[in-house]
Image (cartoon, grey):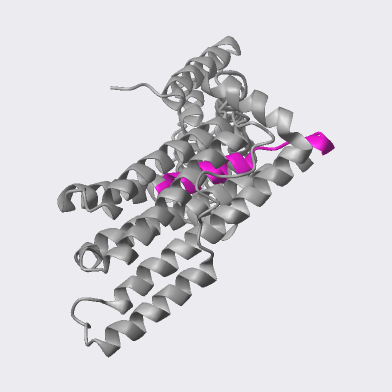
Amino acid sequence: MKLGARILKTGLAIIFALYIADLLNLPSPVFAGIAAIFAIQPSIYRSYLTILEQVQSNLIGAAIAVSFGLLFGHQYVAVGLAAIITISIVIRLGLENCISLSLVTVIAILEVQDGNFLTFGLIRFVTVLIGVLAAFIVNLVFLPPRYETRLFQSINLLQDEIIRWTRLAVRQASEHTSTKQSLRKLKEHHLKLNQLYLFYKEERRYIKNEKHVKARKLVVYRQMITTSKKSLEVLQRLHLHENELSKLPEQFHIMIQERLDFLLTYHEQLFLKYSGKLKPDHKAWIGQEEYLQRNEVMDIFAEQIAISRENDEDEEFSSYHLLHILSRILDYEENLEHLDTLIMSYQNHHGDEIKLEIEDSIF
């Protein structure tokens, strides 16, 4: 079993909350621990938002519980009605994530037997607030998440797998079932990339220059994710039309294989370029001299369609499926070129910063 940073931080937040509540001699410090559990979030910014939301929702729950306690006393029906009203108001205000903790506050206040609901409500609210603040402090100080590092490494790892399977698929060397299983895992990995990107995007910068730098980074990382998605679509098409691919004329098969080899190498070198491991003066890519332009590829494609129709080779040459493959490859190529442009633009302004940050994170 792997213990992640969030699991460790949850345990520390509970300990910290219980310790502070006990230090202040608050009754039932366990509620501070419960609040800390609900308040731990995957990013510092989300922890900050959670504090605001939890304070609002618990104020609502405490106010309703005190009101019902003063009106109806310690009655089970009053607890249920207070819970219903609390849920309705919290949902109305868009604080759905805080329903559980606000209901804990309601029940904790209405359980009091001596009728001193106002004082007890204030104590319970303070106890819950301590738990929420304890979770925020732990999240801020202990192992603060470095989502940029995780994002870059995840994109890089995903792309390595896609490149490996694409090279096998275009050579008809991969086993059908294995490729299918890998495609499913690669799609799941890509979905996680979007979540990591969102976490990184939510991280706040408070210095003007840092905000500007991060805005540029977000554009680059967004394009990295998009380009990886395009390469995954190419792999999907190669897998889906593997039978048709094997029946292609030899010149087309070789053309697709060489073009993909070039693009995959290009993609690999873009990651090296971004991380500062490629020479700044390196501009020509391997095989670029003999590389066919997009319009030349389409001209060859149109010419082959005409030839196949003249020779009645419809069964041997499926222009429909080939068009699907070619369109994905050309789309992938355009996104690679756009990514290259963005990386060059970023390096012209902040190249040294990228090199230092990535090297520190990987090694």
Q: Is residue 279 left or right of residue 285?
A: right
Membership of 204 in magenta stretch: yes
Q: Percent x, y for residue 22?
A: 54, 12
Q: Percent x, y for residue 358?
A: 59, 27
Near-viewer residue (4 or 357): 357
Q: Does residue 204 appear anywhere in the picture?
A: yes
- Name the residue: 51% across, 25% down: 32
* Image quadrant occupied by the N terminus: top left
- Name the residue: 51% across, 57% down: 291
Question: How many dots with numbers?
Answer: 0
Membership of 149 in magenta stretch: no
Q: Is residue 66 left or right of residue 348?
A: left
- Name the residue: 34% across, 82% down: 305
Q: Percent x, y for residue 162?
A: 37, 46
Magenta residues (range):
190-210
Q: Does residue 59 appear anywhere in the picture?
A: no
Q: Percent x, y for residue 271?
A: 54, 38
Magenta span main SS: helix
As drawn, which residue projects farthest toward the top? 23
Near-viewer residue (57 or 319): 319
* The quadrant where residue 164 appears: top left
- Name the residue: 27% across, 47% down: 168
As drawn, which residue projects farthest toward the right? 208
Q: Is residue 85 above or below residue 251?
A: above
Q: Is residue 190 above or below residue 132?
A: below
* The quadrant where residue 318 appears: bottom left
Near-viewer residue (186 or 306): 306
Near-viewer residue (208 or 351): 351
